[in-house]
């Protein structure tokens, strides 16, 4: 189903080697050069050639990062609270899901199925008339890394004069992953005979413009392509947005003794490791669905925010990581990397900017966040908006550019400048 190159990427970054590096090198010199193009940092001696020894060393270097094999013990030792390695049903390796999968039913049958199992939990089909205020109708899955943005994005859109249609199926940890939700909604594998097609029913029986996803450990492109194929069957113009999360302490072999450990260079390295891992998922999808798959650059936004903090430019923020500096108002609040107080706004701004191609700095009306009106302060909120637009407009896979610096996606202003993202 996927290219030879992708298989190699999986081997290098996530699967133990069963045969010798020498034997694989003899068989795969061409593939190694293809891999070098994808991960130039693996060429440690900078001679323009990648050996299996270098590839294995690079895999081992990345071994502490989310999604890498062998991370189970590290996860336990560091108190993550969520599994980082786990068994996936062998059915995912087949060309077709079980015949009873909901995705193979007619739209009316999917609706009927959800009517039975979801009785009393809301309508069998959630639908919205086409907005006349510019809003996009969005469905989404995700976990606690996505929920902050799911909560704040509608409020931000409201401040921009839009009523944001958003329908989600979320869960904690693994239960919010694209793979888990597909199994759950279809009633397959671990959910055999127990379908719960909350989103599938509405996707098949209503109109939508976009779907959003959060990443999870051991992700593979097929966990997303199943959703994409289903959506395009019923809504051919839909686009798809994948968050890339952000750097985590698990990427560091030993917990830093102080926040002095973090420098611009360290943050850049952590961010690059995230990009390398996320490329395993996003690159095959972008090739399979040209012009359809985009990144929500939450990682770049948090790295930019961290650099602002190091320069003393985040008023009211006390530390980088509560697990290290013990400050409540930190960028990250726990070992896994959940956002600290106030940063749900930054994530929401990233979601808004990517979906609508407009800088949140242009929003003039009050945004009804509620809660503590003194924190984040107006000055901190302004910086969040600036960071979000910088992250989105500068990311090569967000689909957004702003060469003239007016805070509006170039493609929406000058069609001639539009190019394949």
Image (cartoon, rainbow, N blue to C red):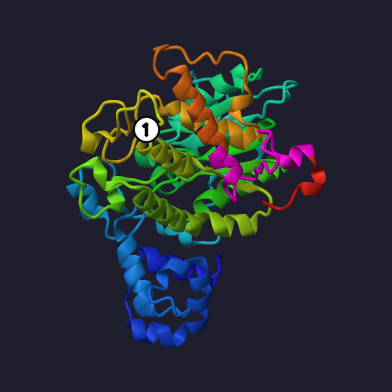
Taking the image as shown, residue 287 lies to the left or right of residue 70, namely right
Q: Who is closer to the viewer here, 62 or 215?
A: 62
Quarter holding the N terminus is bottom right
Number of on-image labels: 1
Q: Who is closer to the viewer here, 177 or 74?
A: 74
The image shows residue 378 at horizontal and vertical percentages of 47, 18
Q: Main secondary structure of the magenta part?
A: loop
Instruction: Name which quarter of the figure residue 176 lies in.
Output: top left
Where is mark 1, residue-wise?
312
Q: Is residue 398 visible?
A: yes
The image shows residue 55 at horizontal and vertical percentages of 38, 73
Which residue lies at the image location 20% right of the left edge and 42% below the top edge?
Answer: 258
Label 1, secondary structure: give it. Answer: loop
Reply above or below: 93 against 105: below
Q: Who is closer to the viewer here, 397 or 407?
A: 407
Q: Which residues are magenta?
A: 390-413
Determine if the magenta segment contains residue 135.
no
Which residue lies at the image location 43% right of the left edge and 27% below the top edge?
Answer: 344
Q: Is residue 201 visible?
A: no
Instruction: Name which quarter of the figure residue 59 lies in.
Output: bottom left
What residue occupies the far front of the structure in this picture?
311
Instruction: Name which quarter of the figure residue 269 lies in.
Output: bottom left
Assess disc 1: are there few (<14), some (14-19) or many (≥20) residues with their C-alpha within 10 Å of its C-alpha.
few
The image shows residue 57 at horizontal and vertical percentages of 32, 71
Taking the image as shown, residue 187 lies to the left or right of residue 209, namely left
């Amino acid at each position: 189903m996927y290219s030879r190159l992708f298989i190699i990427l999986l081997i290098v970054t996530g699967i133990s080697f069963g045969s010798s590096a020498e034997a694989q090198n003899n068989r795969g010199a061409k593939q190694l050069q293809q891999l070098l193009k994808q991960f130039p940092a693996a060429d440690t001696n900078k001679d323009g050639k990648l050996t299996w020894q270098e590839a294995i060393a690079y895999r081992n270097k990345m071994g502490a990062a989310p999604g890498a094999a062998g991370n189970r013990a590290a996860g336990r030792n560091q108190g993550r609270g969520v599994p980082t390695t786990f068994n996936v049903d062998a059915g995912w390796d087949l060309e077709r899901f079980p015949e009873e999968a909901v995705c193979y039913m007619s739209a009316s049958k999917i609706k009927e199925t959800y009517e039975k199992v979801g009785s009393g939990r809301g309508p069998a089909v959630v639908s919205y008339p086409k907005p006349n205020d510019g809003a996009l109708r969005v469905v989404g899955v995700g976990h606690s890394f996505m929920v902050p943005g799911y909560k704040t994005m509608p409020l931000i859109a409201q401040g921009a004069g839009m009523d944001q249609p958003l329908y989600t199926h979320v869960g904690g940890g693994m239960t919010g992953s694209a793979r888990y939700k597909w199994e759950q909604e279809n009633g397959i594998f671990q959910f055999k005979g127990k379908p719960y097609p909350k989103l599938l029913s509405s996707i098949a029986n209503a109109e939508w413009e976009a779907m959003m996803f959060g990443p999870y450990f051991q992700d593979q492109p097929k966990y997303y392509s199943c959703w994409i194929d289903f959506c395009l069957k019923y809504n051919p113009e839909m686009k798809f947005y994948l968050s890339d999360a952000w750097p985590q302490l698990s990427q560091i072999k030993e917990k830093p003794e102080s926040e002095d450990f973090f420098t611009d260079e360290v943050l850049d390295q952590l961010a690059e490791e995230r990009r390398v891992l996320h490329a395993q998922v996003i690159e095959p999808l972008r090739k399979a669905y040209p012009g359809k798959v985009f990144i929500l650059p939450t990682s770049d936004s948090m790295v930019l925010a961290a650099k602002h903090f190091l320069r003393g430019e985040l008023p009211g923020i006390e530390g980088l990581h509560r697990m290290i500096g013990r400050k409540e108002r930190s960028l990250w609040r726990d070992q896994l990397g959940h956002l600290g107080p106030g940063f749900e706004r930054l994530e929401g701004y990233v979601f808004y900017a990517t979906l609508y191609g407009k800088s949140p700095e242009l929003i003039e009306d009050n945004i009804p966040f509620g809660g503590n009106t003194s924190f984040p302060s107006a000055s901190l909120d302004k910086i969040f908006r600036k960071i979000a637009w910088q992250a989105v407009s500068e990311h090569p896979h967000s689909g957004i550019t702003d060469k003239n610096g007016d805070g509006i996606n170039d493609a929406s202003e000058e069609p001639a400048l539009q190019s394949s993202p």
